[in-house]
């Protein structure tokens, strides 16, 4: 089993041990550099660059630069995806995000982690666990989402949260570590009236 296959299986792997992984990261960096330097008025070029980088994406894709990721091909975005500035996705495993998802500024989505055992960590080993974010989710500013997490449909993750475990559908969750405050209801939008 090569390192790419180990990563996909959630096993420890060496990210620099397989030249194909190193080449894929380098190719992503080149595309990201072009995207992040692109004239903001040239939406057609921005869309072409994103489509060439990502594994898949729906209609209405908008990622405000700067944007950074490891590979790009492990990122799958639904329709009407919007992200504000400074999104980082470490996509060593699959990152699947549903339709109508809004992500605020300075959010990190990290599939990669390292062993707690110092000897294995010092060997440069890491693991990667997939992340899934449902439909109609709002991720507020400064949120960190850790490996293996699933966030259910219609959920709001409050600003500055560190999401260390699964969050169910249709709730407001926040904190470090992120916890469910309560189910969402129409009263949650009272400030919008």
Image (cartoon, helix red, strand yellow):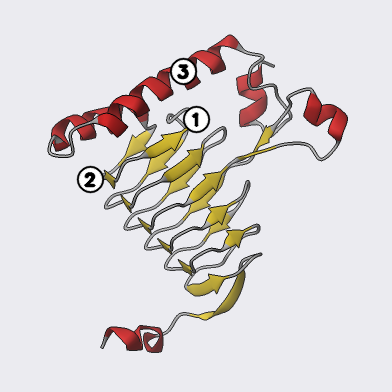
Q: If the image is split into quadrants, where does the C terminus sit?
A: bottom left
Q: Quadrant of residue 65?
A: top left
Residue occupying image coordinates x 69% and y 21%? 14
108 horizontally vs 15: left or right: left
User: Helix or strand or loop: what does disc 1 sit on?
Assistant: loop
User: Does label 2 or label 3 sit earlier along the sequence?
Assistant: 3
Q: If the image is split into quadrants, where does the N terminus sit?
A: top right
User: Helix or strand or loop: what does disc 3 sit on?
Assistant: helix
Residue occupying image coordinates x 51% and y 48%? 108
62 horizontally vs 101: left or right: left
State the CA–CA distance, disc 1 to disc 3.
Answer: 9 Å
Disc 2: CA contacts within 10 A as few (<14), some (14-19) or many (>=20) = few
User: Helix or strand or loop: what does disc 2 sit on?
Assistant: loop
Query: Which label belongs to residue 59?
Result: 2
Disc 3: CA contacts within 10 A as few (<14), some (14-19) or many (>=20) = some
State the CA–CA distance, disc 2 to disc 3.
Answer: 27 Å
The location of residue 141, given as percent across then percent down, is 44, 60
């Amino acid at each position: 089993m090569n390192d790419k296959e180990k990563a996909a299986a959630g096993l420890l792997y060496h990210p620099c041990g397989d030249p194909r992984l190193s080449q894929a990261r380098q190719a992503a960096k080149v595309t990201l550099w072009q995207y992040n330097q692109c004239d903001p008025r040239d939406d057609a070029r921005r869309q072409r660059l994103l489509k060439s980088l990502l594994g898949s994406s729906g209609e209405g894709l908008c990622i405000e630069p700067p944007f950074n990721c490891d590979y790009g091909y492990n990122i799958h975005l639904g329709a009407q995806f919007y992200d504000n500035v400074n999104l980082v996705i470490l996509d060593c495993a699959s990152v699947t995000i549903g339709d109508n998802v809004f992500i605020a500024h300075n959010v990190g989505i990290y599939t990669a982690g390292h062993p707690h055992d110092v000897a294995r960590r010092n060997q440069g080993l890491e693991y990667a666990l997939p992340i899934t974010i449902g439909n109609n989710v709002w991720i507020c500013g400064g949120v960190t989402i850790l490996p293996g997490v699933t966030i259910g449909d219609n959920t709001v993750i409050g600003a500055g949260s560190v999401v260390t475990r699964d969050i169910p559908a249709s709730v407001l969750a926040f904190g470090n570590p992120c916890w469910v405050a309560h189910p969402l209801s129409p009263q949650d939008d009272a400030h919008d009236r």
